[in-house]
Image (tube, rainbow, N blue to C red):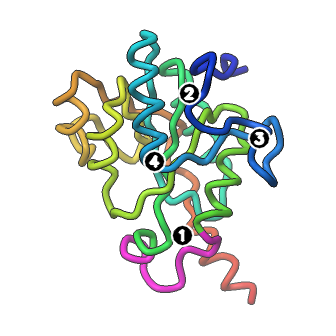
Amino acid sequence: MPPPRAAVASRPLFPLRGTRPGYSSAMAPVLSRREAAETAARLKVEGKALVFANGAFDLLHVGHVRYLEAARRQGDFLLVAVNSDASVRELKGEGRPVVPERERAEIVAALRCVDAVVIFPESSPAGLIEETRPAVHAKGTDYTPETVPEREAVERHGGRVAIVGDPKDHATSALVARLKGRG
């Protein structure tokens, strides 16, 4: 069972769970980029370790859940950066994403291990990592610490890279291909 969600501050700078229309009290907030940076700065002042995870999270599957659960165990607060629709198309090709960015962000925000979500438009999260300066950047097992593209951005601010989750036996691309074969 993951540790309880971290309390960020006594007076939040932004609406938290249960205060945004359409969001339940159990759902993590979907933050703007500015709110994500403010949250990260506040966590640092409080001595809490921010964990940063990222991905497209198109057609959420068990590999995603295991990755995020393992990422959450690396620190006090898990911020998940979700690729925008345009960046997913750029990275994965036409026909992707299957699920629009706001819906993907909301689905990820509903996971108990996630403390906050932010959508980013770039193909790489390096800029957002520079802005949030996480203590830990969690990547899946399809990487090694040496092959993480954002490693330098993380280490430049004193953070570390953690390889987490189970072996890469699950992929949205394979799921999409299987579904198309049944069409």
Labels 3 and 4: the sequence-earlier one: 3
Marks 1 and 2, how far apart at CA: 25 Å
Marks 3 and 4, how far apart at CA: 25 Å
Q: Amino acid at mark 3?
A: Thr
Q: Residue furthest bottom?
A: 183
Q: Are marks 3 and 1 in contact (CB under 8 Å)?
A: no
Tell me the residue that label 2 is attached to: 72
Tell me the residue that label 1 is attached to: 173
Question: How far across and how far down the image is residue 49, in percent?
Answer: 44, 18
Q: Amino acid at mark 2?
A: Arg
Q: Are marks 4 and 1 in contact (CB under 8 Å)?
A: no
Question: How far across and how far down the image is residue 146, in percent?
Answer: 21, 38
Tell me the residue that label 3 is attached to: 19
- Is 123 left, or right, of 9 in this rendering? left
Neighbourhood count class around disc 2 (C-alpha, 10 Å): few under 14, some 14–19, many 20 upward: many
Marks 4 and 1, how far apart at CA: 17 Å
Labels 1 and 2: the sequence-earlier one: 2
Tell me the residue that label 4 is attached to: 54
Residue at 65% of width from left, 42% of height from top?
29
Labels 4 and 1: the sequence-earlier one: 4
